[in-house]
Image (cartoon, helix red, strand yellow):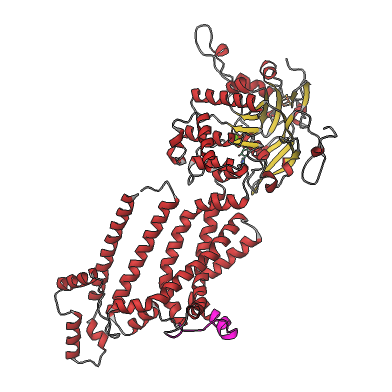
Amino acid sequence: MTRVVVRRLLEMALVMAIVVTIVFVIVRIAPGDPAAMMLGPDATAKDVADLRARLGLDQSLPAQYGRYVWGLLHGDLGQSIFLARPVTQALWERAEPTFFLTLFSILIACGIALPVGILSAYRHGSVFDQITSTVAMFAASIPSFWLGLVLMQLFAVKLGWFQPSGYGGPGASLGERLNHLVLPACALGIVSSALIARFTRASMLDVLGDDYVRTARAKGMSEIRVVLLHAFKNALIPILTVIGLTAALLISGAIVTETVFGLPGVGSLVVSAVLRRDYPVIQGTLLVVAGLYVLINFIIDMLYLVVDPRVRY
Amino acid sequence: MSAAAPATMPTSGGEIDGLAEGVVLAVTDLETHFPSRRGVAKAVDGVTFTLPRGRTVAVVGESGSGKSVTSLSIMGLIAPPGHVAGGRILHRDRKGVVRDLAKLSNAGFRHIRGPEIAMIFQEPMTSLNPLMRVGDQIGEMIALHERISRRALRARVIELLQLVEIPEPETRIDAYPHQMSGGMRQRVMIAMALACRPNLLIADEPTTALDVTIQAQILALLRRLQADLGMSVLFITHNLGVVAEIAHEVVVMYAGRVVEQAPVGDLFARPSHPYTRALLASTPNIARDIDAEGRRRPLAAIPGAVPPITALPPGCAFAPRCAHVLDACREGRPGLVAIAPDHVTRCIRRDLP
Ligand SMILES: Nc1ncnc2c1ncn2[C@@H]1O[C@H](COP(=O)(O)OP(=O)(O)OP(=O)(O)O)[C@@H](O)[C@H]1O
Ligand code: SF4
Ligand SMILES: [Mg+2]
């Protein structure tokens, strides 16, 4: 057990080292001089040279790489050019809405998808199954920003139940913040639930025909217990993978949705950084998102270990 | 069926009269169908037999003759779209209540499965939940039907593991199925089925994955439990040697139908149905098959093959392979006829030697 965990941690470190290098290389081999591109066509040669020096672009590549990695090891993602603060600080300030948006989205997605998937597998071929399967197919093909706009129009503008945009002022209460998160989380969660529901249904269908489910029934237990305790637990293993994948996808989905709903999260930070070519911020966000992907993967792997006694790598 | 037994009155709860005293299970004209795109597969199509209390009835028949489907029908465990399409499965529980299991709901089965009827499944490798410790799987059976403390439960489970001769039960109780061999898993299945001391045990080839010594021990165990608890056993097997050892009566199945039922001695001494005779003749028997010089005589294989259940001939299903077939055999489907007390056969010929 400990050996598995240590091995996975080492693998994670290796993956991160590769990601760090790739990000470094991409920024350097991008055509044109980042400094010149950041400052635009009107900048003087001296401005460009000053910025190059500030970004350390005037040094040799190995030296730049060394400084970059050294900084990362100390938790330093560099300085934002436009925000006049460290990238880590900029990210940290924007982390809260993104974190809660992703968390609520995944909760909503699972809250819809698991019961629907389980029930449609249990009653496969029924009207319920047919309707939910069709709806899921549509839902999977809806862009979340479009659903976001529809929800906003309906529940915020027409009915006025929720705030259409923003995250409340700096002193906003928790309730007010949650109110701002409801619609974007629903938009993301509903769209992601389609994939999880389809996987849950397929995985449950597989498992419900297994011999041990018949054995469970033969003991004289309730159907609920058969389905949840014996079948669903076995079906959960592939479903966990999809939930992890969805969580990772949600992070990128959050970028667009935050922009639609004017949430001051990491997504809108990145969008403005891209527009202003704030390379350190883009680079830093890329690394953090990649780190989160790897972390989610690790968590899913650990969950396998908990659920399935056969997994011992 | 005395008036003093109100439980046997027909009621809307699925309780039905009409089961002879001393009979635990009476299956009549059972039909179990599996619809598919290519038509309905009548896996069981006219199964009729009775199981007296405290007795062992063996069910024999070639592969695919519907033995497992019959047992699963009794347990109410036929997976949709398969279903019991006709017939009655009258069962008398410990309290004397008679029910037609063919019409019982899933909820109605909850108190039947386990303490009243338990089943050992044919597939020991896949019938255990891979995510649960075997001890928990056995214990679950008990905890579902009895109030019992955790400690007492564990002790009971260890006792059951000892009963089926699993070595080191104190450690094996915490093993997962994948850590056990097929034979061990089969013993776990047996322990699970016996956990609530069922009134009726259905054992579907319970000893196939076991070597001969363990097989003998398990058979001895079943006989002992039968004597101690008055348990009735429906024992499915291919092995006529096992039949001779354990059964009081034998049911012979062919192509989804019961073709003969008789007390074991009667059946071996005076088999009536041509299929039963062929089956007995195709079974190795040292006394008969080895001649004086120690050479082995060839076994009499039954010519032809079991017809696919979707394409059974009209009339007698055995007709295409029967050495005694008449034109009349192909016309009407023969019914079960009593040729002696407790001996029935599904063949129209009374004139065979
Ligand atoms: N779920 C199912 N769907 C369709 N057909 C089935 C199903 N289960 C069983 N059958 C068919 O029913 C027939 C009887 O099968 P059954 O398993 O009862 O045979 P058996 O007598 O137990 O054979 P064996 O000795 O090999 O265990 C077979 O032809 C089989 O193909
Ligand atoms: S009914 Fe006819 S075909 Fe069938 S077993 Fe008897 S003799 Fe053979
Ligand atoms: Mg079988």
Look at the image and say whether residue A153 sits in the magenta stretch. Answer: yes
Please state the horizontal and vertical placement of residue B27, each as a whole percent of the image.
Answer: 73, 34
Please state the horizontal and vertical placement of residue A215, each as a whole percent of the image.
Answer: 57, 42
Q: Residue at x 48, y 43 (%)?
A: B133
Q: Residue at x 49, y 36 (%)?
A: B185
Between A135 and A238, the one lying in front of the other is A238
Between A210 and B278, the one lying in front of the other is A210
The residue at the far right in this view is B3
What is the span of residues highlighted in magenta in the rendered image? Answer: A150-169
Q: Residue at x 23, y 86 (%)?
A: A36
Ligand 1 lies in which image quarter? top right
How many circles with numbers are drawn on the protein? Answer: 0
Please state the horizontal and vertical placement of residue A80, each as a whole percent of the image.
Answer: 27, 81
Please state the horizontal and vertical placement of residue B115, each as a whole percent of the image.
Answer: 64, 38
Q: Quadrant of residue B200?
A: top right
Q: Is residue B21 above or below residue B110?
A: above
